[in-house]
Image (tube, helix red, strand yellow):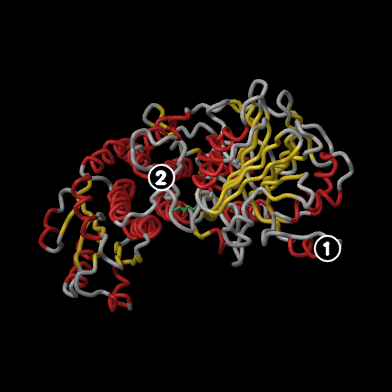
Amino acid sequence: MCGIVGYVGNKNATDILIEGLEKLEYRGYDSAGVAVLKEKNIELRKYKGRLSVLKENLQKDKIEGNLGIGHTRWATHGEPSDINSHPHMNSGSAIAVVHNGIIENYLTLREELINKGYEFLSETDTEVIPHLIDYYYTGDIVETVKIVVSKLEGSYALGIIDKNNPDTIIAVRKDSPLIIGIGEGENFIASDIPAILKYTRKVYILEDGEIAVITRNNIDIMKTDGTRVKKGIYDVNWNLEAAEKGGYDHFMLKEIYEQPKAIKDTISPRYKDGSINIGEFDLSKEYIDSVNKIYIVACGTAYHAGLLGKMFIEKYAKIPVVVDVASEFRYGSPFIDENTLMIVVSQSGETADTLAALRLAKERGAKVMAVTNVVGSSISRESDYVFYTWAGPEIAVASTKAYTTQLVSLALIGIDMALKKGTIEETEAHKILEEIRKLPSQVELVLKNVEDIKDIASHVYKSKDVFFIGRGIDYYVSMEGSLKLKEVSYTHSEAMAAGELKHGTLALIDEGIPVIALATQDKLFDKMISNIKEVKSRGAYVIAIAKENNEKIEKTVDKVIYISEAIDELTAVISVVPLQLLAYYVALNRGCDIDKPKNLAKSVTVE
Ligand code: F6R
């Protein structure tokens, strides 16, 4: 939520800030702004709307300067408007601040500042920060920022400039991501790596409670108590092209097509001589034997992947698993102790609710394993074990390749646990592993079948409501298919366990309503056919997803998309792909802004 960027060097700061914001627009895109130091003054430009609005205005009204900060916003406090856009400044226009996160005690701080005579222009939580800096200003900006952050509750990544320190950017973070790009004669700050990758591959990842003082030739990092921090440099090992559209019309489509590679890259390093070698960590047999329950906690798409993780771990490792959405988890009464393992699943590694669940588990003595896509993310740093999904950067707001790589990761984790516990025969584990290795080419086959999906989309896009049904794993995949359709095409959609339809939802099925019926589970196939007949006989237009040897389904449905023969446990990785493509092409037919759906943002760093 919200992207921040900062530059100090000898180039034109405005151009670099805009380039950086273009790479961060996935984090929020309802308004954007920059503050650039020009000669001795801070020049501010900020507008409601996409980054292009800011860009057009800056073309007419250029700001020349070598130091500045920029922001792309996903509104939390105050509607999207020019005034609520960042940066925010103090009344004397000496200090400018960009912020990602939420200041939870801002109302109290705001009231205190108003009582001291400060005037607020915006409705944002952020605006308290420049006024607080103004109020506590000691003449030393670093000391002042230390005082100010001690007053803040909530989450923040901040970029701060002060016209009295015209060569310095201050960066500070708590619970929101921030990196520092290390250049030659220039330095950068950003919420995420793609923003600075054109200029450098060397970064520092700022930790909670650290302040960085950045000039063009120097970066000082310290804790808020003043202790110096010596940090290792993280060398980014992927290219800028990985974060560009590469000829595709949208990132979402590119990322769907990247899945064979992403799955392969996730599996290959863990496969050694016919067996699993997780590599990054080794869960000992002793430890696995001591685990008597597992919580898988995640949000949205990652939660849907977690459901499949439960299936794998319970079936093969015989450990009870509870899967919960992170925003609910903490408010129940979870049974967590030192014999609990929590697995958090998160593409970004920054999702606030997931992070909070992780911290709760650790406080109560549990170990935490992260399945995440972002090296150096908060979740990866705070977990005891990290299993990376090597999907490469995922830019489209709708998650696709992260989901399929999460599925294969959880399958590998489940089999690894089962082997250690001795709850699976080695021969069976090898058989499953061989099936996992076939997945990239099986996904490739679905991608070749795109014309059929485009054809179905050209029918489905006219519908106001779409239902997804399935049983077992197919139900979990239905949930993901339905979410994808909702978020990118704004079509109302529901996923139902097929056997539940007749307990209420069947009343909604009318003539012509599209029902996407997943029927890939051998042991549930006949039961699914009965459920399909229930909707068909009420007029539904049924599109089935089935394995290629089940052609008899054609008699019962209107259209079928076939996927390769695969063991039931692994079909999700293949069957979700036509659903992703369907969501994409329905959205395209409806003229939606596919990579940046309305009201959403990629990295959800607020609770
Ligand atoms: C949907 C989607 C979201 C995310 C969710 C969790 O396409 O992307 O539902 O899955 O916001 O995000 P991460 O995985 O970053 O924790």
In the rendered structure, the answer to whether residue 603 lies left or right of residue 90 reads left
Real-space Cα distance between discs 1 and 2? 53 Å
Residue at the image point whose x is 29% and y is 70% from the top: 499
Between marks 1 and 2 in the image, the one whose residue lies nearer the viewer: 1
In the rendered structure, the answer to whether residue 447 lies left or right of residue 379 reads left
The disc labelled 2 sits on which kind of residue? Ala
Q: Residues within 10 Å of mark 1 (few under 14, many from 20)?
A: some
Residue at the image point whose x is 33% and y is 54% from the top: 591
Q: Which is more N-terminal, label 2 or label 1?
A: 1
Is the C terminus in the top left, top right, bottom left or bottom right quadrant?
bottom right
The residue lying toward the viewer, choosing from 65 and 98, is 65
Per the image, the residue denoted by label 2 is 411
Question: Does residue 284 appear in the picture of this structure?
Answer: no
In which quadrant of the rendered view does residue 151 lie? Answer: bottom right
Q: Is mark 2 within 8 Å of ligand 1?
A: no
Q: Please, what secondary structure does the residue beneath circle 2 have?
A: helix
Q: Please, what secondary structure does the residue beneath circle 1 have?
A: helix
The label shown at residue 112 is 1
The disc labelled 1 sits on which kind of residue? Glu
The residue lying toward the viewer, choosing from 234 and 335, is 234
Q: Position of residue 157 (x, y in %)?
A: 67, 45
